[in-house]
Amino acid sequence: MTHNDENSFYDKKQELDISKKIGKAKFIKHICALSNSNPDNNSYILIGVEDESNKIIGVDFFDDSKIQNLVNAYLENPPKIQYENVRFPKLPKHKVIGLITIHPSKEISSLKKNSWKYKREAVFYRRGSNSMPITGTIALNNSNKAIVDAIEKNARNNIKLILDGVFDFVNSHSDEYNPQYSVFKEQFVLCWAGKQKKIGDEVFYSRVDIELMNEQVRLFYSFLDEVQINYNEQSFIVTEYISLGIDKKETHYPLEKTIIHFKDNGKHDIVHEFMFEPPQYDRTILQHIYENNNTIIAKIENNVPLSVLEHQDVMRLPKSYLICYLNGFIDAKDQLKKAKIYIKGFDDKTTYIKYKEVLRVLRKVQYQ
């Protein structure tokens, strides 16, 4: 599909940026248009494909479980949407293709409030590869159902693809990550791997990778976050934790629980439960940390060399700014973003990975 031209049931994007007003508005517009143009069949958006060349470049793993809430907040008669992280040959291990499936709402979708330059009550429709505003009344109709049904039928995985996926998963993870698979309801094959770590009587896993082989979909992937894993005959449960603290004294706080529930009818549900209760710290200490961080950011912005100690503090910027934000320093998020280019330039990418993980946590907290 990536090498096909965009049409009335398919769109492709190089990246998805819903953190900015323009990106959020354009995303809502395309969801609205694709839903209205496909009342009887699913429609799709691929993320991680260059528009002109069709080159597959991939994107970072995206686990924003609240993306449906965004659509619900901006659209009347919102369609159900699903974001999946799909592995693709030859992409780096940390890159995937983002697949957004839009399930039709059967009713006309429209904006329920203003979004950037798009006005409340605006209705969008697909005309070829363009999402166009429609004036006046429209009737939902399309002729894509037979085409999309044929594409979806042809795309369903067979047993060979599932087995190949299992072997590939096991072979691509070293023994220290203990790669393994589980079968649910005699039809779902789920592979997972993670580096085990014991803290007291509790077992955590880091660098966790979880994939559902039936659909070649990556369900969870994280470089740094630590999780606990439990499963039974019908469910696989991942509880994600975040380690936070000051003065090198860190505590594990539960962030979010993901329950993958497998059904007898060949389908599965994924339910997310947000659990995070932000830790509170002494305001005076945080004020000192915040001002010190801001001094470092000012130097970075003005190309002033950092001292050795300040350079070491940069390594702690992501989490220290996160703690500040969670304790009422609202500008901390914007301050952190100013350091992106500087942090990204480090040869050791650990701090940049922490930076991206912190932004992901901030996004989850913001949706709540």
Image (cartoon, grey):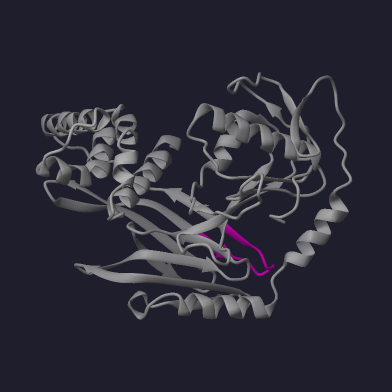
302 vs 364, left or right, is: left
Place of residue 55 in the rendered image (x, y in percent of width and height, measured from the top left): 62, 53
The residue shown at (77%, 45%) is 9
Residue 55 painted magenta? no
Viewer-nearest residue: 236 or 365? 365
The residue shown at (62%, 32%) is 26
Looking at the image, how many numbered discs can be counted on the residues? 0
Q: Quadrant of the N terminus?
A: bottom right
Place of residue 77 in the rendered image (x, y in percent of width and height, measured from the top left): 71, 33
Quadrant for residue 28, please give it. top right
Viewer-nearest residue: 32 or 351? 351
Place of residue 323 in the rendered image (x, y in percent of width and height, measured from the top left): 24, 39
Viewer-nearest residue: 273 or 78? 78
Quadrant for residue 318, please give it. top left
Determine whether 279 is above or below 46 in the image. Answer: above
155 vs 226, left or right, is: right
Quadrant for residue 308, please give it. top left
The residue shown at (72%, 67%) is 156
Viewer-nearest residue: 148 or 104? 148
Q: Which residues are magenta?
A: 259-269
325 vs 287, left or right, is: right
Place of residue 59 in the rendered image (x, y in percent of width and height, measured from the top left): 51, 51
Determine whether 28 is above or below 66 in the image. Answer: above
Q: Quadrant of the C terminus?
A: top left
